[in-house]
Amino acid sequence: RRLVRRGAATEAAAATDAAPSGPSGLKTILDAKVDMNDIVSLCKRRGFVYPSSEIYSGFAGFFDYGPLGVELRNNIKKAWWADMVQRRDDVVGLDSSIIASPKIWEASGHLAGFSDPMVDCRESKQRFRADQLFYAKVSDAAGTHVGYVSLLEGADMEAVARKAAKSLLKKAGVGGEPTVSALKDYTEADPSEFDLIPSPATGVPGSLTPPRDFNLMFQTSVGAMTDASSVAYLRPETAQGIFTNFKNVVSSSRVKVPFGIAQIGKAFRNEITPRNFIFRSREFEQMEIEYFIRPTDVESEWRDIHAGWVETRLQWHIGIGINPELLSIEHHKCLLLIADCFLFFISLYFALFHVMGFKRDDKLPHYMRACSADCCLYLYYYIN
């Protein structure tokens, strides 16, 4: 918390010498022309985050936290644990194992369905997530179809697509302004279009494979033998350890429903294309609470509990020093947005604010009444 206050004081002092920018006079990341490379460089230079295995050319998707980074991480975890567990009577803690029985992942559906759509470029041998690869049809001024353009998810995709469309018209010897259709991700492409859509790596039409599912769990072997019976997985999330220990927790701690089980721990996902610095890595840490209530058909009962937790999280962020003027709640049919600071960067750059969304999914598992996922608007796009 001292780091938070120090960062706030530093930014407040800087703000007095600068023109007001943003709702609180603080300069936001959208105002400062900062890209991810600037942030990566700053984190390494100041001892917050280092690329893992850097002296051996690095290892994509993994990061090491330096002297200041580990202190900041520990401060955040300690503050969260103290407020969410130790100061509450209805939440207890747990620290479950990283490797568990494969039967757990079979029962939870992870073996069959915990996957991302993957696509390969036959020319460059690069791999992409199909839902992060976008394409559009291009027509000339007369409405005649000319071809397709493709691009990866990022900032100003419409502008990038239009620029690529102009290049396509120029190569085809066609003048005038192009007409670009609405961008769609590659999973929406009709099979008849696979041979027409170019690879974003090479620009060669038809070089992309059809999308296929890629399971994100890291596989390992347990025991002296390496065969089918020894296969196990690193956990891709911490929730399953909470669910499988529910009976043990109830029996040993004498808690009664409604109550929650909290856990802080490592999780691992074999991302197809790790990117965006620490926001999409293959090894990360989760702080999670699973809150259990009695089955009820009265919607207002569980909605009140869920709304209470959303408000608790909002007030917690205010309580650790985030400017309330940067916090707002916007209700949608399936999405509740909270403008928020991403905690890791509070002391680095206090005014870099993001959007955390509590996302209600209509396809909830049978055992859930409500589920909230945080989404961050970082730089120019949302990140879970």
Image: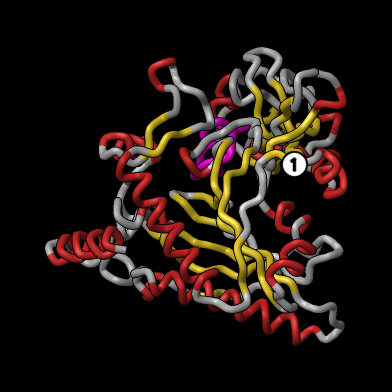
Could you say whether the residue bearing mark 1 is in a helix, strand or loop? strand
Q: Determine the residue located farthest toward the left in the rendered image.
A: 17
Q: Residue at x 52, y 35 (%)?
A: 275
Quick check: can you spot residue 311?
yes
Q: Which residue is mark 1?
A: 100
Quarter residue 309 falls in = bottom right
Quick check: can you spot residue 149?
no
Residue 343 horizontal/vertical position (percent): 41, 57
Horizontal arrangement in the rendering, residue 114 relative to residue 356 (left or right): right
Residue 24 horizontal/vertical position (percent): 30, 71
Q: Residue at x 56, y 68 (%)?
A: 337
Q: Residue at x 58, y 64 (%)?
A: 357
The colour scheme of the drawn protein is secondary structure
Residue 1 horizontal/vertical position (percent): 32, 63
Above or below residue 35? Residue 212 is above
Q: Residue at x 34, y 57 (%)?
A: 346
Q: Determine the residue located farthest toward the top in the rendered image.
A: 123
Q: Amino acid at mark 1?
A: Ala
Neighbour class for label 1 at 10 Å: few (<14), some, many (≥20)?
Answer: some
Q: Determine the residue located farthest toward the front in the rendered image.
A: 252
Residue 79 horizontal/vertical position (percent): 42, 64
User: Residue 228 versus residue 127: which sits nearer the camera?
Assistant: 228
User: Residue 89 versus residue 45: which sits nearer the camera?
Assistant: 89
Horizontal arrangement in the rendering, residue 269 relative to residue 58 (left or right): right
Horizontal arrangement in the rendering, residue 186 relative to residue 83 (left or right): right
Q: Is residue 159 magenta?
A: yes
Horizontal arrangement in the rendering, residue 169 relative to residue 345 (left or right): right
User: Residue 165 versus residue 264: which sits nearer the camera?
Assistant: 264
Q: Is residue 334 magenta?
A: no
- Magenta extent: 150-166
